[in-house]
Amino acid sequence: MKTVNKSFPSVDGKGIMMGRVAFTDDYALQNSLIVKILRSPHPYAKIKNIDASKALALAGVECVLTHKDFPRIPFTRAGQGYPEPSPHDKFILDEFVRYIGDEVAVVAATSNDICEEALSLIDVEYEVMDPVLNFEEAIDSSHILHPEPEIHEMFPIGFEPLRNIAASYHMHIGDVELSLKESDVVIQQSFYTQAQQHTALEPHTVNAQMDYQDRLVLYSSTQTPFHVRRILSQTLGIPLSKIRVIKPRVGGGFGGKQALHGEMFVSYITYKTKKPSKIVFTRKEVFESSYTRHPMRLDIKLGADKDGTLKAIDCYVLSDTGAYGEHALTVFMVAGSKVLPLYNKVDSVRFHGHVVYTNHTPAGAFRGYGAIQGNYALESAVDMLCRKLHMDPIEFRQKNMMKENETSPIFAIMGEGTEGTAMNMESCKLDYCVKRGKELINWDSIYPHKNVSREKIRSVGMAIAMQGSGIPYIDMGSAIIKLNDDGFYNLLIGATDIGQGSDTILAQIAAEELMTSLDKVIVYSSDTDLTPFDTGAYASSTTFISGNAVLKAAKKMKGLLIEEASKVLKCNVTETDFDGFTFKNTVNDEIINLRDLSNRLTYNEDQKQLVADSSYVGHKSPPPFMAGFIEILIDRETGEIEIENYVSVVDCGTPLNPKLAQGQVEGGIVQGLGMALYENVIISSKGKNITSDFLNYKVPTRMEIKKLVTEFAESYESSGPFGAKSVGEIGIDTPPAALANAIENALGVRMTELPMTPEKIIRALKAKEKRQ
Amino acid sequence: MKISLIINGQLRFVEVEPGEYLLDTLRKINILSVRRGCDNTSCGVCTVLIEGKPVPSCSYLSVRADGKSVTTVEGISDEAEKISAYFGDEGAEQCGFCNPSLALTVYALKKELIHPTDEQVDQYLVSNLCRCTGYISQKKAIKNYLGDQS
Ligand code: FES
Ligand code: FES
């Protein structure tokens, strides 16, 4: 392989570092109206009256929008395939507000200052209602978040809004109760995971203008331009053909930009006033009013035989979706479907639970998508079980975990809100990952811990993980390849590069198949007018789904080229050789190079534009696997943790661009460490987010991250492009469990609640002392 | 009011409001490499060099910059290109939203500290957040750049 499995620098890195126009707000017209949102100060209230007359009288105010301006069409902002597995439970603006930060009214004005002033001049009369702020008390609470009759599910997802249930689910294989009863050793534990915020450094940003064909042109910092176009049309009644969504460079997404945030308002205002407009979320708005990760409580029971055979996994999950049910069911299901198959030899499994509404900032898609929560619970519980069994946790995993060519019945049962797809693990090097990681972290010389000084202890912990590669039979990617004169290509893709490097690796796939160099493939993503459909950057789908589409299109282009060349060389296609630059008639050795052929097709003879297109829908979702190992230094007096090293050994099939793949893993690891250690969206007892900036919501800085060691297992997934599987999400899954296991290995206390702050560690130690 | 700024070596007269921040002034005159990532001086994305020293332009009043030299990444493009090659080699470029300001800060660091330790480099760059890379690839790239330049 010449171009893939090679670490090319990303195609856009240099230009972006040099400060070129790249991101959404760089494309906003200077005369754009500024759009700002008046947000609810109450966690739950009915808007009795809005008086905007003073704001409207202010010079420079273009318009003030309230719920009366929008048709009452329930929809979901989730940005998923259609029909969505998320309930249609949101109105663009509503007479109810359901969390502090929810949208009350929208102002467009000629400047930021005028906007701010106008917001302060809007008089709103609220009827304040009792909120639901404890997700464990949401079900059947007398305070119902969504009594409105118009809302609905698109297909059965267990939607019971009058009970504050956004979705529910139940599956089982075998008889869990019986297996647990028959097990020699059983453990039972509840785990809590918190709300985490994506904090992509570029806030949610949208701008719009009408073009000279009187169409709405939107620049959006989105992961899903095609879903944005569809949802705008469905909710605003603008014909789809009148909307063009351009996704320029996106400054990080991590799932937070899968959904629509400011798009509706900016589109409506520009479409109505014909004036350009823009919105840039403040960081506070990103924290309070976009999305968080779904907080969960996971009640887990494991049963095993004395010899260390895992027999049963029982898991009940209660998930908090906040005010709206975006990604409610699917995130919850992934906590099971992309975690439980890791232990595929059990007699019985049960996975069930509810996703509930609360008056919190809505939860949505976030890298890991439920798997990190599920992984934390299961991989913590496995270590607890090993303790009880007096068994080495690595040995236990090696005995019970998924191996190559095996399967799990869960794949067929659990899909993306629907039934799943059966598949065999054609590539699964988990065995190697565990073995290699153990070496790299020096497990045998540290496990379970080493005393370093009177206070400090060094310890190790580990966890294994899996993810998916797109959603089978739902996600579609497509690609168009166009030949230019001078013999270079355009690759047009709907897949959305949000910083993960997909433009680069998709160009590498095309270059590899066309046997050309990377600079001969000019990649462009994504623009609903110019690039073919793609569901977008989510569910770890781009490498596998969009990558397969690119590969198919490149194959087709190669066929077209050979066909045209054989005409010139006057031979059969089977007699034409092509090495990427030169075509040869193998009968008489006559040659023509690609450059001459392309110029001839463009200007001289047999003129035509060569274009190849293709689409791809997955028939399975081959999981990447990994083993994560952490080495920590912990202070038993202060509970302070230093991360000494994090080792990741990953099976993502062929890493198409090893350095970029490593970047995906390490970025995920550090986000996972943030979640494990301190990232926490804290909501006060009054429902207010008190962590709405980087001073109060701590994300990892370069001071805390000292060493990451990342390696890839030799692996080849035959259904993936050049053997590749996904790698975008898997990195985030293991840190919480690995860290919790390392803490227990050091101090003998089990941390069952994230984040694992020094205070909680000290509290656990004190409780342990008391028990002794 | 009108102020004068020496932006990337070029004297420019710019009309600003009294309470206007340099970040907004720069974007207004189409210096778009300077971007906003937060509301309270806590992300580093808006960093510019004032008289050669890194400063968050989101909280620096434009009037305070009157008569001063302001450097953005457009003003050090040769150096930024060099730095980007080191980043490229390490796969340290992801979304890039943090990169122009990081390149500027690395450039200022190189001028200010001679043979800095890894710890000093991290300290100097600590306010430049990055949410994508996990930092290690950036650290390697920066170390290689500084090593080769000294
Ligand atoms: S914008 Fe974040 S520090 Fe200036
Ligand atoms: S590369 Fe995205 S924030 Fe640094």
Image (cartoon, coloured by chain):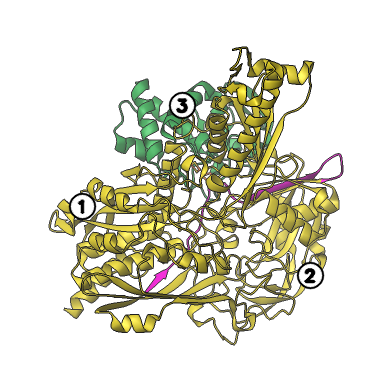
Chain colours: A yellow, B green
**Chain under callout 2:** A
**Chain under callout 1:** A
Residue beneath disc 2: A72
Residue A36 in percent (x, y) is at 70, 55
Q: Nearer the viewer, mark 2 or mark 1?
A: 1
Q: Report helix, strand or loop for mark 2.
A: loop
Residue numbers of the magenta segment: A190-215
Q: Report helix, strand or loop for mark 1.
A: helix
Query: Hey, what amino acid is under mark 1?
Result: Trp
Q: Is residue B29 visible?
A: yes
Same subunit, tags 2 and 3: no
Query: Hey, what amino acid is under mark 3?
Result: Ala
How many numbered circles are shown? 3
Mark drawn on residue A357: none
In the rendered image, the vertical position of residue B22 relative to residue A285, given as above or below: above
Mark drawn on residue B85: 3
Query: Hey, what amino acid is under mark 2?
Result: Arg
Residue beneath disc 1: A443
